[in-house]
């Protein structure tokens, strides 16, 4: 028995030894395999270890800024917030009263209470966002909600594209969607230039129990982000602001269907200001009218087209201003073309016909003096058959209606054929610039984040359709249109204006024109000073609500006169008007003097005598600085801000325009955030409160 037991034990030991040997060989083989291949079940151990101990972080590259020619920021990346509601009752900071919370949030966010209440009633969710209405809220909204101390309401910061100047040339600047993608204007056309490139940072951590302490012996890998390039536009901050403000005033007074305004430097082709109504309100991100009428909408130009018919006739030597013709009506292939005064003015000179905007005179010039073929050649030379090539991707082309004699005749005085406003302004640059027609542009330069210049636009002559002498004669006749003809509404005190009115009929969609005294596109295309124009301004107002004692030139001139007068004074243009008039005092421009170190009392008296409104912030007795600065020419009634020594004290800015608020910002260094458009209705820093470094000023603006 002992022998058998011994044999069995030996067999068992041998069996176990064999098993252990096999296991050892398996483990040894596995170990050697892992050593050689460095992987388990297809998973690379080195890579897996690197992943486990590496903490990756994305360093976001910011989008570039869009700026004016004087470096005011129009579009920037700013911090915004997302509202989050904590619903889980196990969290001590959860929403206690959903209806009350929804009601208070709805009031600040100006939305429906029930919609918010429904979002906050998800019993299964730990926390919820409020969708579109709770995203991208501004600092002022976040602060207003925070002050309500609502349990369970927290905020997540984010970066969003914001527009500090509101609807400042918003069709040129454009807008982005909620994801930051450009959908119109510069934001779309130059998205690849504006976009930044993300960087990264990879740190080695121990990964022990999730603490993730950084390993000091390991090297940190990183790539810095590259911010996008900055786009510097040709837009002039002050001229654009005056254009916006005057348009807002006309909208308020006349409620038109559409307004278009363009200001160009005819010497270079730079667009100094451009705006449309209806506008885009980019900070609200709920506007669907992205069409830039100035570039993308063509229509019958009306009598502004006569400028180019006149210039062509003069250039060809077939215009004799003293020659007479019979006004009233003329027959073209069996159809009568009438003057706007159907009975006419009898037999008058062509000069008088130009001043009175006679359709008959311009039909004769195109049909008999020039001939329709030669007239068409000039229309091509002025660029009416092609796009201007402005550095925006939204430009469209009008349509020549020029097949039959009647169509050719009506084109001579602005009916039938359609053109865009930018085409008209570009063609007019040849009249203003001694025959040289300049290519329009809005991008002055592109710089990188360090200020290095990557691209700069140079002025370009598109064509020279007329001679310098023709341009001069045309301007002289157009000046007489303003002084002695249909353009009398557009006279300025300090500058001679050369230009032409337009009253274009609006098609009704059925082959006819709309009827009624309001159903026109009223416009004016003018340049000044007439002897050597520094600016071209085009304004068109469609379907204004006119009172019985008003005419279409009234709303147009409210914009044109204000913008042209201010723009020329800002550019220090030389007056070409005889100042030895009875109203010399009225013609004297208001120029801001140097008031530094002078007493506040005397400064206020001096400014009031000049006809401007002084605004003091601070409680000192001496002036430290003013805005605008010394030498600035102002319109009567403008505000001049006075910064005194000592503490800076916030003034009451209720009723101020955004341009006036920006003066305050320039003097105080405040960081501004604003909502809405029009005039200030509320301010986050109350009047009389001390302004401290780093303060943020939030304002709401509304249209009156």
Image: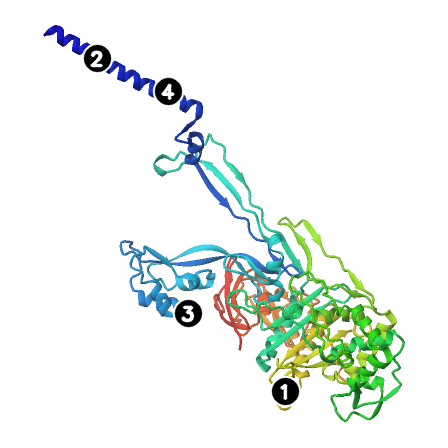
Badge 3 marks a residue whose secondary structure is loop
Question: Disc 3 vs disc 4: Cβ atoms closer than 8 Å?
Answer: no
Badge 2 marks a residue whose secondary structure is helix
Q: Which mark is residue 13?
A: 2
Q: Nearer the viewer, residue 627 or 520?
A: 520
If you read the primary sequence from the N terminus, does the residue marked by circle 1 or circle 4 appear first?
A: 4
Residue that carries the numbered disc 3 in the rendered image: 111
Residue at the farthest left position: 1
Residue 74 lies, in percent from the top left, at 60, 61
User: Left of 480 or right of it: where is 142?
Assistant: left
Q: Quadrant of the N terminus?
A: top left
Badge 4 marks a residue whose secondary structure is helix
**CA gap, disc 3 to disc 4?**
70 Å
Residue that carries the numbered disc 1 in the rendered image: 515
If you read the primary sequence from the N terminus, does the residue marked by circle 1 or circle 2 appear first?
A: 2
If you read the primary sequence from the N terminus, does the residue marked by circle 3 or circle 1 appear first?
A: 3
């Amino acid at each position: 028995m002992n022998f058998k037991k011994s044999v069995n034990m030996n067999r068992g030991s041998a069996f176990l030894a064999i098993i252990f040997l096999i296991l050892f060989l398996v483990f040894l083989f596995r170990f050697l395999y892992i050593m050689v291949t460095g992987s388990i079940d297809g998973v690379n151990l080195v890579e897996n270890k690197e992943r486990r101990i590496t903490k990756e972080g994305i360093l976001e590259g910011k989008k570039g800024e869009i700026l004016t020619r004087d470096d005011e920021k129009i579009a920037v990346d700013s911090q915004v917030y997302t509202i989050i509601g904590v619903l889980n009752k196990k969290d001590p900071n959860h929403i206690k009263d959903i209806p009350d919370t929804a009601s208070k949030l709805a009031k600040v966010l100006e939305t429906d209470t029930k919609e918010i209440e429904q979002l906050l009633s998800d019993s299964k969710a730990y926390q919820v966002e409020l969708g579109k209405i709770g995203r991208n809220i501004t600092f002022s909204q976040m602060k207003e909600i925070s002050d309500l101390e609502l349990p369970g309401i927290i905020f997540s910061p984010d970066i969003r594209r914001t527009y500090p100047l509101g609807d400042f040339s918003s069709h040129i600047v454009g807008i982005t969607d909620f994801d930051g993608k450009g959908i119109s204007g510069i934001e779309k056309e130059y998205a690849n230039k504006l976009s930044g490139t993300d960087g990264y940072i990879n740190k080695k951590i121990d990964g022990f129990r999730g603490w993730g302490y950084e390993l000091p012996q390991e090297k940190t890998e990183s790539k810095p982000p590259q911010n996008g390039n900055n786009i510097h536009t040709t837009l002039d901050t002050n001229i654009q602001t005056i254009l916006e403000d005057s348009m807002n005033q006309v909208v308020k007074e006349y409620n038109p269907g559409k307004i278009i305004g363009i200001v160009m430097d005819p010497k270079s082709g730079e667009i100094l200001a451009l705006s449309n109504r209806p506008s885009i309100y980019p900070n609200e991100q709920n506007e669907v009218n992205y069409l830039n009428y100035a570039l993308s909408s063509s229509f019958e130009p009306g009598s502004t087209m006569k400028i180019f018919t006149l210039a062509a006739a003069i250039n060809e030597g077939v215009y004799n201003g003293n020659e007479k013709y019979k006004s009233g009506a003329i027959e073209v292939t069996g159809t009568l073309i009438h003057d706007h005064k159907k009975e006419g003015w009898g037999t008058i000179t062509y000069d008088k016909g130009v001043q009175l905007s006679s359709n008959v005179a311009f039909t004769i010039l195109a049909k008999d003096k020039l001939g329709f073929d030669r007239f068409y050649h000039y229309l091509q030379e002025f660029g009416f058959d092609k796009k201007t090539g402005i550095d925006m991707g939204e430009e469209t082309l009008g349509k020549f209606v020029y097949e039959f004699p009647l169509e050719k005749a009506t084109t001579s005085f602005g009916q039938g054929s359609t053109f865009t406003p930018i085409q008209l302004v570009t063609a007019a640059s040849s009249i203003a610039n001694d025959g040289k027609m300049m290519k329009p542009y809005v991008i002055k330069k592109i710089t990188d984040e360090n200020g290095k210049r990557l691209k700069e636009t140079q002025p370009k002559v598109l064509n020279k359709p007329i001679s310098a002498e023709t341009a001069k004669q045309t301007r002289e006749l157009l000046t007489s249109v303003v002084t002695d003809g249909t353009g009398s509404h557009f006279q300025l005190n300090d500058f001679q204006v050369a230009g032409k009115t337009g009253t274009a009929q609006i098609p009704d969609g059925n082959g006819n024109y709309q009827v009624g005294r309001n159903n026109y596109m009223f416009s004016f295309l003018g340049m000044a000073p007439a002897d050597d124009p520094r600016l071209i301004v085009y304004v068109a107002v469609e379907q204004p609500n006119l009172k019985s004692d008003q005419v279409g030139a009234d709303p147009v001139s409210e914009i044109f006169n204000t913008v042209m007068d201010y723009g020329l004074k800002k550019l220090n243009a030389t007056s070409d008007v005889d100042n030895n008039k009875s109203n010399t005092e009225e013609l004297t421009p208001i120029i801001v003097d140097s008031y530094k170190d002078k007493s506040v009392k005397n400064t206020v008296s001096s400014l009031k005598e000049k006809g401007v409104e002084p605004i003091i912030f601070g409680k000192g007795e001496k002036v430290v600085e003013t805005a605008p600065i010394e030498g600035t020419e102002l319109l009567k009634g403008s505000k001049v801000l006075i910064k005194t020594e000592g503490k800076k004290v916030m003034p009451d800015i209720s009723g101020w325009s955004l341009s006036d608020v920006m003066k305050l910002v320039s003097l105080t260094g405040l960081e501004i955030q604003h909502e809405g458009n029009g005039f200030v209705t509320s301010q986050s820093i109350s009047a009389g409160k001390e302004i401290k470094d780093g303060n943020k000023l939030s304002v709401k603006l509304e249209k009156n």
